[in-house]
Image (cartoon, helix red, strand yellow):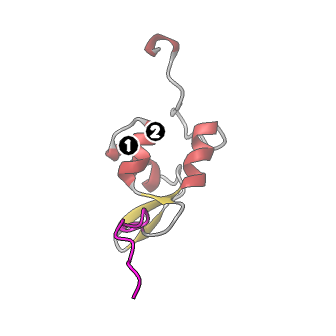
Amino acid sequence: MGKRDSAPSPHVGRVCDGLLTVKEVAVLLRVSDESVYRLCRSKRLRATRVGGLWRIPRESVDKLLSGGQAPNGFDPAPAENEL
């Protein structure tokens, strides 16, 4: 028998490639987890509940960051005085 690679897969624990957790989205957007939950509940950020947990498609976050789906009052770019 051949020797098995003991390195863990980078996908272990992930629901599906391309889906992010609330915590991962919060880090990307630099907002709190609660802000991400609000964006999901208000449908300003496309999300799905999987087993009771929110999962957000990466492309939905990318659109939000690029300005394609910016929710009302949410600007992912920092204001000039925050730079």
Question: For the residue labelled by badge 1, is the local secondary structure a helix, a strand or a loop?
Answer: helix
Q: Say which mark, if any, is on residue 29.
A: 2
Tag 1 and tag 2, C-beta contact below 8 Å: yes
* Image position, residue 6 (x, y; %): 34, 70
Q: Which residue is drawn at 39% across and 71% down?
A: 5
Q: Which residue is drawn at 52% across and 32% down?
A: 76
- Give the magenta-colored segment's residue range: 1-14
Which amino acid lies under the numbered mark 1 shown in the image of this protein? Ser
Chief secondary structure of the magenta portion: loop
**Residue at the extreme bottom of the image, as rendered:** 1
Which residue in the protein does label 1 denote?
35
Q: Say which mark, if any, is on residue 14.
A: none
**Nearer to us in this view, 4 or 80:** 4
* Image position, residue 63 (x, y; %): 63, 45
Image vertical order of residue 61 relative to residue 49, above or below: above
Q: Quadrant of residue 15?
A: bottom left
**Nearer to us in this view, 25 or 69:** 25
Count of marks placed on residues: 2
State which tag comes first along the sequence, 1 or 2. 2
67 relative position to 29: left or right: right
